[in-house]
Image (tube, helix red, strand yellow):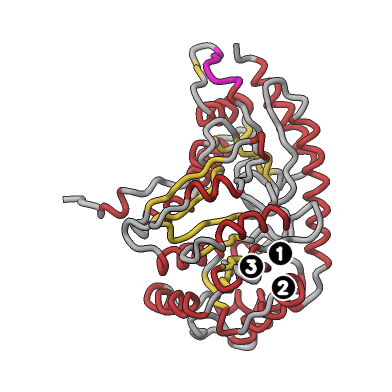
Amino acid sequence: MNQLSDRLNSLSPSATLAMSQKSAELKAQGVDVINLSVGEPDFNTPDHIKEAAKKAIDDNFSRYSPVPGYPALRNAIVEKLKKENGLEYTAAQISCANGAKQSVCNAILVLVNPGDEVIVPAPYWVSYPEMVKLAEGNPVIVTAGIEQDFKITPAQLEAAITPKTKALILCSPSNPTGSVYSKEELAGLAAVLAKHPQVVVIADEIYEHINYIGKHQSIAQFPEMKERTVIVNGVSKAYAMTGWRIGFIAGPEWIVKACNKLQGQYTSGPCSVSQKAAEAAYTGTQAPVEEMRKAFERRRDLIVKLAKEVPGFEVNVPEGAFYLFPKCSSFFGKSAGDRKIENSDDLAMYLLEVAHVACVGGTSFGAPECIRMSYATSDENIVEAISRIKEALSKLA
C-alpha cells in the first residue's frame, strides 16, 4: 500500500529544519553545539505585545475570526503600509495568514496553473521552488553569484521571461544572503516587468526592518507595479514573534479575494490571540524594533570581520536580514582523515560534527558553493563559532 501522492513525492524536505533537528540531537547527547542554522531572532517578544495577548485572552478573543483576519488588525496593517512604505491599500486588500510562509504559498496556489513558470532568483529561500512545485508550476531558477551581491540584473530577468511566466518571487532583504535591492535596482526590474503585464510579483518583505542601509524599498512603489505586486510581510522577524504565526499579503483585491477563498477551505483565519498581539505590534511603540535592528547590525559587523579572517572563505557584506552566506567552494575536494568534502552540504555536516557549529549547506538554497550562517545569536557565540570553524577548516587538506 503506502502510496503517497505524486504531489508529496515531488517535494524535498526542508534542509534548514533538518539541520536544526540534527544539531538538537547532538545537544541532547551533551555536545555543546552553537546553532547558526535557525532563521529566527534570539530576542523575546516585546512586553507590550505580550500584554496585548494576555488581555485578548481575558477579553475572550477565543472564537473564529474572519478568514482574512480581524478588521482591526487589517486596518493596522493598512496604516503601517501608508506610514512606513507610502503605499495606499484598503482593508479589503489585506489578508492575514498563519505566518508569511502561508501567505507566500497562498499567493502561489491561487496564481499558478500546471505548467506555468515562476521565476525564482537564486540563492532563494528553500521553500519557494517547493511551493511552486506544489502548485504544479515550474520554478525557473535565475542565478546571481556573490560577485553581483546575489542580486539578479534586469537583463537576467528579461532573459528568463517567456509566454508561460506567471510570477516572479522577489525576496528583499533576502534569506539566505542578506542582500537588499536598492530603489534603483528595483526600478530596473520594474522597467523590464512593465513590458510583460502578465507577470505578478510576489514580494517577500518579511525582513523589511532588519536593514542596515536605510529605508526599505518595495517594488510596489512604482505606479506600473502596484496592481501587479503581492506584498508578503508579517510580525515574525521585526517583532521577534516567529511562533505567533501571523503573516499577511497586501495586493490587488482579485488576488486577495482568491487567497481568502483558498484559506477559507483549508485553515480559516489565523489564531485570534496572535492577531490581537500583532495588532499591538503594529500600533504600539516601534522602539524595540530599532533596538533589535541595532543589535543585528553590530553582530553583522562582527561576523563579517571574523569570517573575512577565515582562509578559504569568500565573504560579502550583507545589507539586511541576519544571515552571512560565504562562498566556500575552495574546500571542495579536500579531506580530513577519511572524510572528503564534495559540496557545501558535506562541509556543513563536517562543521557540525567536528566544530560543533550548525550551519546550513547552500545546495537547498540554490547556491551549492555557499553556506548559510545565521547571526541571530549572542556576540560570544559568534566569536566562539567562527573560531571553531576556522580551526576545523584548517584540518582540511
Q: Hey, which quadrant is residue 248 in on the image?
A: bottom right
Local secondary structure at mark 2: helix
**Residue hosting label 2:** 281
Provide the secondary structure element on which disc 1 rests. Answer: loop
Height in image: 40 above or below 247?
Answer: above
View extreme (left): residue? 1
Q: Amino acid at mark 1?
A: Tyr
In the image, residue 74 sits, relative to residue 375, either above or below, namely: below
Which image quadrant is residue 310 in?
Answer: top right
- The answer to the question of whether label 1 and label 2 lie on touching residues, with beta carbons closer than 8 A, is yes
Return the residue at label 3. Answer: 220
Q: Secondary structure at mark 3?
A: helix
Which numbered tag is attached to residue 145? Answer: none
Using the numbered discs, state the Cα–Cα distance from disc 2 to disc 3 in whole angstroms.
Answer: 23 Å
Q: Earlier in the sequence, mark 1 or mark 3?
A: 3
Q: Residue at x 42, y 53 (%)?
A: 162
- Position of 239 with respect to 94 (left or right) is right
Query: At which x and y percent is residue 167?
Result: 47, 60
Identify which residue is drawn at 82% across, 61% down: 290
Residue 157 location (% of width, % of height):
54, 49
Q: Which residues are magenta?
A: 330-336
Circle 1 residue: 239
Q: Position of residue 184 (x, y in %)?
A: 72, 55
* Residue at x 20% of width, y 50% of height: 2
